[in-house]
């Protein structure tokens, strides 16, 4: 199944579809501004954002702030330096 981001306009009726973006980010702290800027420029408003390979420790994840999103769940690698999943 392919899930493509969709643009949502304020005057459109919403439906029951789910807009999801997954990005193998390979280092979230260095790329968060670029990613959120892309969402704004492309007018993409997903309900769910999933980052894999965020390369962060759990204690640092709460410091991330993505406007209009809250951290839902995460996984951080304990035995490897890199990896992890962040879902908001």
Image: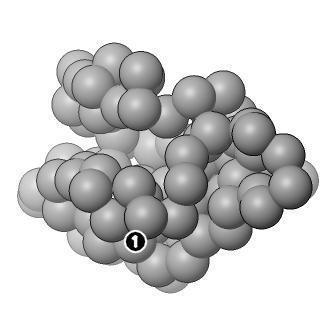
Residue, disc 1:
71
Residue 63 at x, y = what percent? 27, 56
SS at circle 1: loop
Residue at 66% from the left image edge and 27% from the top image edge: 26
Residue 80 at x, y = what percent? 84, 46
On the question of residue 22 being in view, the answer is: no
Looking at this view, is 81 or 12 the one in front? 81
Q: Examine the rendered structure and indicate whether residue 83 appears above or below residue 31.
A: below
For residue 1, side relative to residue 6 (left or right) = right
Residue at 55% from the left image edge and 77% from the top image edge: 73
For residue 2, side relative to residue 63 (left or right) = right
Q: Quadrant of the C terminus?
A: bottom left
Residue 77 at x, y = what percent? 77, 57
Judged from this view, the residue extending furthest toward the front is: 79
Residue at 75% from the left image edge and 39% from the top image edge: 81
Q: Examine the rendered structure and indicate whether residue 69 appears above or below residue 45.
A: below
The crowd level at tag 1 (other Cα within 10 Å; few <14, some 14-19, many 20+) is some
Q: Quadrant of residue 14?
A: bottom left
Looking at this view, is 21 or 43 the one in front? 21
Looking at this view, is 32 or 23 the one in front? 32
On the question of residue 70 being in view, the answer is: yes
Residue 70 at x, y = what percent? 31, 72
Rendering colour mode: one colour
């Amino acid at each position: 199944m392919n899930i493509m981001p969709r643009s949502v306009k304020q005057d459109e009726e919403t439906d029951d579809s789910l807009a999801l973006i997954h990005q193998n980010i390979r280092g979230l702290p260095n790329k968060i501004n670029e990613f959120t800027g892309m969402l704004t420029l492309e007018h993409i408003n997903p309900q769910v954002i999933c980052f894999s390979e965020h390369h962060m420790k759990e204690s640092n994840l709460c410091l991330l702030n993505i406007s209009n999103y809250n951290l839902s769940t995460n996984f951080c690698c304990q035995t490897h330096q890199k990896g992890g999943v962040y879902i908001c």
